[in-house]
Amino acid sequence: MESKPRLLMTRRWPDAVESELRLRYNVTVDGDDRKLSAAELQQAMLDFDILCPTVSDRLDASILSVPEPRVKLIANYGAGVDHIDLAAAKTAGLAVSNTPDVLTGATAEIAILLMLMASRRASEGERELRDDRWLGWRPTHLMGQNLTGKTLGLIGFGRIGQATAALAARAFEMRIAYHAPRRATSEIEAATGARFVGSIEELAAAADVLSLHCRGGAETHHLVDARLLQRMKPSAILINTARGTVVNEADLAEALARRTIWAAGLDVYEREPVVSPALFDLPNVVLLPHLGSATLETRTAMGMRVVANVDRFWAGEELLDRVC
């Protein structure tokens, strides 16, 4: 009889987190850090007590509804859970947790980084330099835009949106506007200097930088499409650190190529890790490989949040971060 519950991590986590988990659980993780197949995930549902997936694991009904699963808890490593079929998990009697709060600051920093890189054409300039195409300083070379004093429009105004607003206002004195399903409290609006805009279309038309901080899922699928991009200023910049499915990448590539908008900065993509080929040849888009939470401090904190949820669940206590 096994003395420790069996726990599967679908990818490698920071060493400190793996070591902590091994103290109380029989931990399995692929040493090559490869993505597991659907068949392997189905088998894991039968072989383990706890499954710890990441955003790259698509847990649909075909996986979660296997007969007589051994798994009782899906402890997700990450805040977003749109890769998990929550309805299927609930039907199967599975508990699901996530890791909110701990990645707020790091993701906000990446949003600001993308704004700077896109507005100052930094990615374009680095490629020119690495390709040995730089001819030296000249007055009209790679001229970008200032962020200072511009209007930052935020679609979604949760923790990350608010943190991004605070950084932008403090560092660049940007004016903050936002649209969200529910208006923030007057206290939050006062603290961030943000004003509520009644529609996404109105926000898109007013923003110099339009930054996405909304959830994924059916309600926001292709929220940013050709129609919305047409409403933006020709000088505007689109930033996405939310979910790749929020943006229609084909429409965005066409808008960038036609200079409907000035630039874009992306950290997430519709079909990760696949990126639309049309984006690669465009000079006015910054592409990052989903680095939003990629700091040692944040990824460790995310892992320790998973540990806390797993410990509480196995002790028969209420989860800290129950999703379903």
Image (cartoon, rainbow, N blue to C red):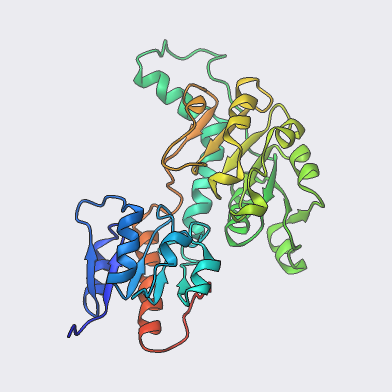
The foreground one among 318 and 178 is 318
At 69% from the left and 40% from the top, the residue drawn is 149
At 66% from the left and 58% from the top, the residue drawn is 157
Q: In the drawing, does residue 149 fall left or right of residue 109?
A: right
Residue 281 image point, x, y percent: 48, 21
The foreground one among 5 and 91 is 91
Identify the residue at the far bottom of this view. Answer: 316
Identify the residue at the far left of this view. Answer: 1
At 53% from the left and 15% from the top, the residue drawn is 141
The foreground one among 292 and 253 is 253
The foreground one among 170 and 7 is 7
Q: Say if 53 sits above or below 141 in the image.
A: below
Q: Say if 225 sits above or below 168 in the image.
A: above
Residue 11 image point, x, y percent: 30, 57
At 78% from the left and 55% from the top, the residue drawn is 196
Identify the residue at the far front of this view. Answer: 67
Residue 245's image quarter?
Answer: top right
Q: Say if 197 sits above or below 280 in the image.
A: below
Q: Say if 121 sits above or below 58 in the image.
A: above
Residue 261 image point, x, y percent: 67, 28
